[in-house]
Every structure is written in C-alpha cells, then in structure tokens.
Amino acid sequence: MNRRIFLMGVMSCLIASVINSQLKAAEGPASGSEDYATIYYSAAPWDGAAYALEIPLERTKDASQPFIRISIWGNPEFLEAKTLYFSGKEDSGGGPARGSGRASFQAVLNKSWPENLAGSVSFKTLQKDQPVSGTYELATLDGKKTFKGSFQAAWGNKPMRVIR
C-alpha cells in the first residue's frame, strides 16, 4: 500500500514537471537573439519597493546557470524609453550612494556570489503587468566579463501586500 502511494506521488510530480517544462518552453521567444527574462515585484534591502529583473544567459564551462539580475528601486513606471546607469558601486543599504538600483551577475543563480556590474539598461517602456523589453550593456568592475544584448520580460508575480 505504501509503495503504491509513493509511486503515485512520484508519477504525479513527474507529470507536473513535464507539463510545466513544456509550458515554459512554449513561452520563450521565437528568436534566439533576445534573452527571455522575468521581472518580479520585489523589495529594496531597506524595505522599500523595487523590481527585480532576471535575464538568463548562455551556459559556459564556468557558469552552469548564469543570470544578470537588475534591481530597480521604487517601482517606477516608464511610459517612454528610459535608460538607467549603474556604477557597480551602488549602496544597497539605502544610503546616499544608492542610485536607482543595481546590476549583478551570478554564474549559478541564487547559489554563487554576485559580481557587481557597471553599465546601462534601457527600457522601451516599463509598466506594471505589461510585457517589458529593452537592451543592456554591462561589465564586471574588473572588465573581464562583458554582457550586451536585448531582453523581453514577463511578470513573474503580483505586487506584495503591505500591512502598515
């Protein structure tokens, strides 16, 4: 009896994984030149509102799950094209050098130490619950890694509820 329950549970997880992975593959862009990203409602480190944009990159021998993460403080909306610039030295603690956000690179998403990036990210528009697209040109502070491309992002969650 326990074995049957175990097997049914495993099969259910397997079927759900297959269905979920097919949906994710179908949601990707038709063209390989654009990175398909996800934008999330998030929170700044000092408890302010923020967006987190995650752009997947091609795997390499040194990076098994590489991503660029761009944090934008304050949940702004850009109805027209807007470019944000990052020095790579932004103060994520909310101090005077906090800038409008920060950009970082991780070789393995959420498992490797993030490297700060300097450069720019340009948005065509940025409106809540609408597809977000743009371009990026970023580099590590030592200049050894450079990233340039375009992205199209879908929203990955809903705004956080705040109780005050």
Image (tube, rainbow, N blue to C red):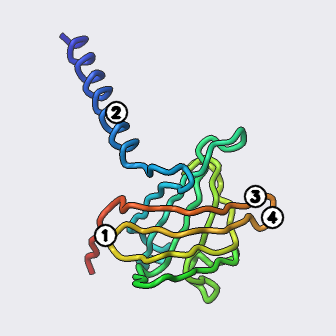
The kind of residue on which mark 3 rests is Lys
What residue is shown with label 4?
143
Mark 3–mark 4 contact, CB under 8 Å?
yes
**What crowding class fits label 3: few (fewer than 14 Cα within 10 Å), some (14-19), or many (20 or more)?**
few
Mark 3–mark 2 contact, CB under 8 Å?
no
Q: Earlier in the sequence, mark 3 or mark 2?
A: 2
Q: Quadrant of the N terminus?
A: top left
Label 3: state its secondary structure. Answer: loop
Q: Earlier in the sequence, mark 4 or mark 2?
A: 2
What residue is shown with label 3?
145
Q: Name the residue rendered at 63%, 64% in the picture.
A: 104
Q: Earlier in the sequence, mark 1 or mark 2?
A: 2
Q: Earlier in the sequence, mark 1 or mark 4?
A: 1
The kind of residue on which mark 4 rests is Gly
Q: Is residue 15 left or right of residue 103?
A: left
Q: Quadrant of the C terminus?
A: bottom left
What residue is shown with label 1?
129
